[in-house]
Image: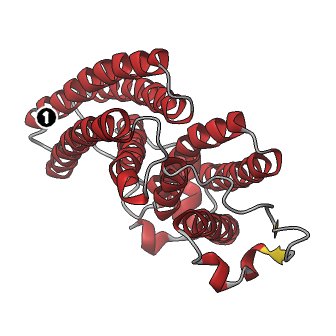
Amino acid sequence: MPLLLFGGTVTGIEAGMAIDGWLVLEPGRGDHFLLFYPVEKWFRDDGTFAEHTHRLFGALVGLLAIATFVATLLADPRRRARILTGAALLAVCAQGALGGLRVLENSPSLAFLHGALAQLVFCVLAASVVYLSPRWPVGAHKPWPQATELKRSALTALCVVYGTIFAGAWLRHAVSNTALAVHIALVLVSTVLCFFLAKKLKASARHDDQNPAGRGMQEAIALRLNILLGSQLLLGSGSFWIVFLVVGSAVPEIHQSILPTLHVLFGALLLAQLVSTTMWAQVSGRVAPAEEGALLQANPGGAA
């Protein structure tokens, strides 16, 4: 999340090229290795601070992705767990390389792609978190009453919300009336889809009398969806006011980037919640026997 916050800030204040170079910073004028960039230069202005901090958090996420993959190989026999954490590591590496190329090439197009794909990387990381969670079922899991319909609705909302975020990234990197129109249209569609998904979750929970845990989870997910959706609509309205009515064609100050950056972050959180909802609806009522048996053999106490 801090990585997304600083990445959004870098875009908001147009500081993507505040520091020349990628792994070797300021080539020919210091040749500093990324992790040893001098503190006095790091704090010289808002743009340099935001950009270098964003890179440092990117390096940290990369190291954590490596550690998670290695730990999964050593401690978790489930094939899907290894696939997910491996995919997360590859996604983080690809995103980091794309960010580096954006700087080396000084390419606005790569900057847009880097911002748009960041949300997909966040989705893969969220899926890994959900699957590796102690709450993820390793045995019989009581089905939700409307699991199939909920999975379909959640997956549809997930795709449309990502389309909305993609259009939002387009709007942030190349302000145009077309991008604004597409983004607003998708906001309306995604709002309706998320609202009715939350409503379906509540309806499913009301019919889940024999499964208190499942009922509680569905109600909690519905509440989080409504909170995230409401927050996004408010932050989006505030961002529109700042970007189009206050700042205009000027370069935003760092305090003016706060609402647009929070808008980016809450979009990622909404997307992650939809990933989680889709996964829980998918697993409701079934766990692959081979994976369940492998985990029970490896950790019978934990599975119990």
Pick whichever, 235 or 38, lies toward us.
Answer: 38
In the figure, is residue 52 to the left or right of 105?
A: left
Instruction: Identify residue for label 1.
Output: 202
User: Which of the image's four quarters has the C terminus?
Assistant: bottom left
Do we see residue 143 in this rendering?
no
Determine whether the residue tagged by mark 1 lies in a helix, strand or loop.
Answer: helix
> Which residue sits at x=61%, y=39%?
117
> Which residue sits at x=59%, y=76%?
44
In the figure, is residue 93 to the left or right of 230?
A: right
Quadrant of the image occupied by residue 86: bottom right
Q: Amino acid at mark 1?
A: Lys
| Residue 135, x across and y down, in percent | 36, 60
| Residue 85, x across and y down, in percent | 63, 56
Do we see residue 22 in this rendering?
yes
Quadrant of the image occupied by residue 215: top left
In the figure, is residue 5 to the left or right of 80?
A: left
Which residue is most to the front? Answer: 250
Pick whichever, 58 or 210, lies toward us.
Answer: 58
User: Which of the image's four quarters has the N terminus?
Assistant: bottom left
